[in-house]
């Protein structure tokens, strides 16, 4: 399967989804490339307005439990529509209008797959963009891989995106690409923060039963071997059911082991419930590093005073010294623009959503025709680009089709203009991103 312009009859969306699911390509299924090769008749339809309008699909969770990851999308998409209206993308020497077609995954992987299929088959998008954790990115990427539509994903650890889809490091995928950080980066950032607080080096693990939880807790690629190398013991009571209301089993296990480090990748609502119950049952770690769920100001404000010094990874902030290749905005400019437009505090997904369009524009400008989807995919695979989230190099790996982004660590502190602000406290691997404080223990056991 070379491109999406083969002269074949167009399958309906229902036929396409049925073929994909029958081939074992679903929310977490693998074997995508093999299934695609076995079904050469599945192709992206020719666009209805060739050479004039570029259609970009964008899928993210605007509602549901993952909505914090999509909160800034309307701001970013509106800004991009205005930018492209004033700055058409030149392809093959001719200016092209840009249409951005957004779809809400509703925080459901099956819904994400369905709307992605609609964008490919009904709307004939030339390029798909997707963000909002592996629950969204994997399902959309799988649909694009099967259909031969170039796709760029972000805001998902590369292990969750690659292995969660049955991919192999040496081959990657033919049509789908990712820029993000990896578990190795989260592990290094968390360990640096742990090492700065005196603990018994026992960490309680809060893993959900989703793709990210399985990846983070993997005995091969996840935290257990990395923590052991640094002298930490992980207490793993087993993956909890995402959305579960009761965390008493996990809390009992952590208390029994006197786990003074808390480690997890819980969603916002799950962590808020866990943290509230921990206080009720007297579980008080000295440091807590939580991925995914506490990256957002709204979540932290809901937790209240108990959120002080909670730590998480930081993939983008106004302090990042990077500039947009499209608009020339600095990270600080972009964050300030969001606050001015919405009245809300910046959050990390702003930078990654913006960078998706930087990659899209660079790929489209590199080809001679928007109908040559293979050329668009190849342009992404060969891309080196300085973006607002940092320099991207899709040729460097760590695996085929993945570009790494820098990662630092932060803690939530009382703000000046806002109730809480995320302060960078760990930048050992990326000193170019300035730290604004040092790691502090949770206040319940301070002193």
Image (cartoon, rainbow, N blue to C red):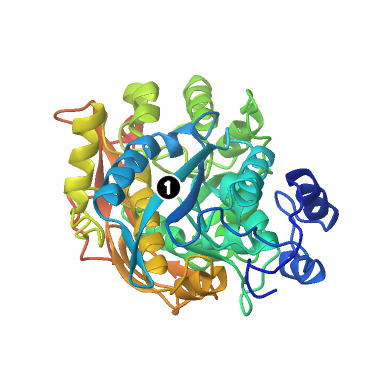
Say whether residue 227 is visible: no
Looking at the picture, how far across and down is residue 54, in whole percent? 44, 55
- Residue closest to the eye, 441 or 275: 275
- Residue closest to the eye, 334 or 253: 334
- Residue closest to the eye, 182 or 73: 73
Looking at the picture, how far across and down is residue 220, in whole percent? 64, 66
Q: Where does label 1 land, which residue?
A: 99
Residue at screen point 77% across, 69% down: 40
Looking at the picture, how far across and down is residue 332, in whole percent? 17, 48
Please state, as top left, top right, bottom left or bottom right, where the N terminus lies in the image: bottom right
Is 168 on the left or on the right of 405, as rendered? right
Residue at screen point 63% across, 27% down: 248
Say whether residue 318 is visible: yes
Looking at the picture, how far across and down is residue 375, in whole percent? 51, 74
Q: Residues within 10 Å of mark 1 (few under 14, many from 20)?
A: some
Q: Toward which corner of the image does residue 348 lie, by quadrant?
A: top left
Most distant residue in the top direction: 280
Is 435 on the left or on the right of 6, as rendered? left
- Residue closest to the eye, 67 or 428: 67
Q: Taking 421 as reference, is 160 above or below it?
A: below
């Amino acid at each position: 399967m070379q491109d999406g312009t083969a002269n074949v009859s167009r399958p309906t969306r229902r036929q396409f989804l049925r073929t994909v699911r029958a081939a074992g390509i679903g929310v977490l299924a693998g074997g995508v490339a093999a299934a695609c090769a076995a079904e050469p008749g599945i192709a992206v339809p020719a666009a209805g307005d060739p050479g004039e309008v570029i259609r970009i699909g964008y899928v993210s969770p605007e509602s549901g439990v993952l909505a914090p990851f999509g909160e800034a999308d309307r701001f970013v998409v509106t800004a991009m529509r205005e930018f492209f209206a004033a700055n058409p993308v030149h392809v093959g020497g001719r200016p092209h209008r840009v249409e951005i077609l957004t779809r809400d995954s509703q925080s459901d992987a099956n819904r994400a797959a369905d709307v992605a299929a609609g964008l490919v088959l009904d709307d004939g998008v030339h390029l798909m963009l997707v963000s909002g954790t592996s629950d969204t990115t994997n399902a959309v990427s799988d649909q694009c891989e099967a259909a031969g539509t170039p796709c760029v994903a972000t805001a998902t650890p590369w292990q969750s995106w690659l292995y969660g889809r049955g991919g192999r490091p040496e081959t990657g995928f033919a049509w789908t690409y990712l820029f993000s950080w990896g578990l190795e980066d989260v592990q290094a950032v968390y360990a640096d923060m742990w090492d700065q607080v005196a603990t018994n080096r026992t960490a309680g693990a809060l893993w959900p039963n989703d793709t990210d939880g399985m990846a983070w807790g993997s005995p091969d690629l996840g935290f257990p071997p990395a923590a052991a190398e640094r002298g930490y013991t992980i207490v793993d009571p087993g993956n909890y059911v995402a959305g579960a209301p009761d965390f008493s089993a996990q809390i009992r296990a952590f208390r029994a082991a006197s786990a003074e480090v808390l480690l997890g990748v819980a969603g916002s609502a799950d962590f808020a419930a866990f943290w509230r119950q921990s206080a009720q049952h007297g579980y008080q770690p000295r440091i807590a590093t939580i991925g995914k769920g506490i990256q957002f100001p709204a979540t932290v404000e809901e937790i209240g005073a108990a959120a002080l010094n909670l730590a998480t990874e930081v993939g983008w902030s106004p302090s990042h010294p990077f500039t947009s290749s499209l608009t020339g905005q600095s990270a600080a400019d972009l964050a300030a623009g969001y606050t001015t437009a919405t009245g809300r505090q910046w959050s990390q997904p702003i930078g990654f959503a913006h960078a998706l369009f930087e990659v899209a524009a660079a790929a489209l400008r590199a080809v001679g025709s928007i109908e040559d989807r293979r050329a668009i995919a190849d342009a992404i695979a060969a891309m080196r680009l300085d973006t607002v989230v940092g320099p991207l190099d899709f040729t460097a790996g760590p695996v085929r089709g993945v570009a790494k982004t820098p990662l630092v660590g932060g803690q939530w502190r009382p703000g000046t203009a806002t109730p809480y602000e995320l302060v960078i406290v760990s930048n050992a691997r990326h000193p170019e991103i300035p730290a604004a404080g040092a790691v502090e223990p949770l206040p319940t056991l301070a002193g």
